Amino acid sequence: MRKWTVQDRYGNRIYFTEERWQHILESRPELEPYFDLFLETLRRGRRQQDSLIPNEYRYYQPFDELLPVNSHLVVIVVFKRQLDDDGEYMTNNFVVTGWANYLWAQG
């Protein structure tokens, strides 16, 4: 399975699997041309922590390419830590899903 790893603007490493990309395209096939923009959203986008699930973040980034129907890509990332084979904790931050949306200008 293919996997892409990026570093966000906050220094976190996040991975995005081919399986999750296909999950996004199953319900939103029109987003297929924007894969690189999804990666860019993870690299440069702002994020907001979910108030009910504290280890889940919503990354969002505006792109003119999405206009006029949408203005932003949104990517949901779960942050976890797990034990490796040596008993050390390692980060396990991964994309769950994503979509395009029209969001009003954020201050």
Image (cartoon, rainbow, N blue to C red):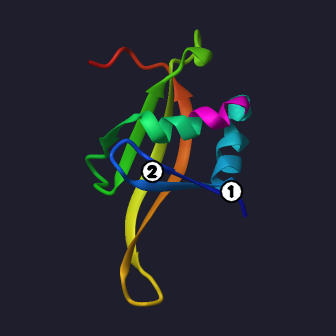
- Residue marked by disc 1: 19
The answer to whether marks 2 and 1 mark residues whose Cβ atoms lie closer than 8 Å is no
Numbered mark located on residue 1 in the image: none
Q: Residue at x 72, y 43 (%)?
A: 26
Mark before the other along the chain sequence, 2 or 1: 1
Relative to residue 31, is residue 107 depicted above or below? Answer: above
- Give left or right: position of 58 versus 50: right
The C terminus sits in image quarter: top left
- Nearest the eye: 93 or 58: 93
> Circle 1 sits in a helix, a strand or a loop, which is it?
helix
Q: Residue at x 40, y 76 (%)?
A: 82
Q: CA distance from mark 2 to mark 1?
A: 14 Å
- Give left or right: position of 23 versus 12: right
Q: Position of residue 100 (x, y in %)?
A: 56, 28
Disc 2 crowd rating (10 Å Cα; few below 14, some 14-19, many 20+) is many
- Residue marked by disc 2: 77
Farthest bottom residue?
A: 86
Q: Position of residue 97 (x, y in %)?
A: 55, 47
Is residue 11 located in the magenta-colored stretch of the structure? no
Q: Position of residue 24 (x, y in %)?
A: 64, 43
Which residue type carries mark 1? Glu
- Based on the displayed image, in which of its 4 quarters is residue 105 positioned? top left
Q: Residue at x 55, y 14 (%)?
A: 64
Magenta highlight: main SS? helix
> Circle 2 sits in a helix, a strand or a loop, which is it?
strand
Q: Residue at x 42, y 45 (%)?
A: 8
Q: Position of residue 90 (x, y in %)?
A: 39, 73
Disc 1 crowd rating (10 Å Cα; few below 14, some 14-19, many 20+) is few
Which residue type carries mark 2? Val
The N terminus sits in image quarter: bottom right
The magenta stretch is 33-37
